[in-house]
Image: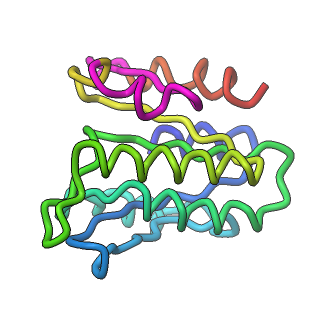
């Protein structure tokens, strides 16, 4: 909600999506706010109901979000991923480790080719051990203390929109 409030306050358009799933056939993409939705109590309620569901197949979600963002007529199109850890889906097709990381990197490159700028914010204290391999080309930040997120977001958003 913090990012949405900050973006809304300065008049930039934003959407808020989430994702979860189990195997390649069951990736769910949740919509809390679309670009043309007002940031109101209904949106805040939908955001508040978002929670961990199952697995995180990052590549598929990044590709879907990229297609939605590519349709937006903005000068700068950011895809900010708020993550709690590495891509993982222990479903029947074993989406983890090198395969999941390669798929995520490929999806990030595809986004960049469409002039979309992905950036990862993680609250995983072990993030430094794997994020460079995943997000090194596009950027990331590890925020170990979740309580510091509100104070760090404005400067981070300014840096990303320059």
In the depicted structure, whether residue 77 falls above or below residue 24: above
The residue shown at (79%, 25%) is: 162
The residue shown at (43%, 32%) is: 121
Q: Quadrant of residue 145?
A: top left
Give the left or right position of residue 153, taking residue 97 as reference.
right
Magenta stretch containing residue 85, yes or no? no
State the residue in front, 153 or 99. Answer: 99
Q: Quadrant of residue 54?
A: bottom left
State the residue in front, 87 or 83. Answer: 87
In the depicted structure, whether residue 144 falls above or below residue 64: above
> Where's residue 64, x and y in %?
53, 67
> Where's residue 38, x and y in %?
63, 65
> Where's residue 1, x and y in %?
44, 46
The residue shown at (37%, 27%) is: 131
The residue shown at (51%, 25%) is: 136
Give the left or right position of residue 135, taking residue 7 as reference.
left
> Where's residue 36, x and y in %?
70, 69
| Numbered range of the magenta stretch | 129-148
Magenta stretch containing residue 131, yes or no? yes
């Amino acid at each position: 909600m913090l990012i949405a409030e900050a973006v809304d306050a300065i008049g930039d358009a934003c959407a808020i999506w989430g994702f979860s799933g189990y195997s390649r056939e069951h990736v769910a993409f949740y919509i809390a706010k679309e670009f043309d939705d007002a940031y109101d109590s209904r949106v805040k309620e939908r955001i508040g109901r978002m929670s961990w569901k199952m697995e995180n197949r990052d590549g598929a979600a990044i590709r879907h979000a990229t297609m939605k963002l590519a349709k937006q007529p903005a000068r700068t199109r950011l895809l900010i991923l708020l993550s709690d850890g590495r891509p993982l889906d222990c479903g029947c097709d074993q989406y983890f480790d090198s395969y999941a990381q390669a798929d995520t990197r490929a999806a990030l490159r595809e986004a960049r080719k469409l002039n979309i700028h992905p950036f990862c914010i993680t609250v995983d204290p072990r993030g430094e051990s794997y994020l460079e391999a995943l997000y090194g080309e596009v950027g990331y930040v590890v925020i170990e203390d979740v309580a510091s997120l509100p104070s760090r977001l404005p400067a981070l958003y300014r840096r990303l929109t320059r």
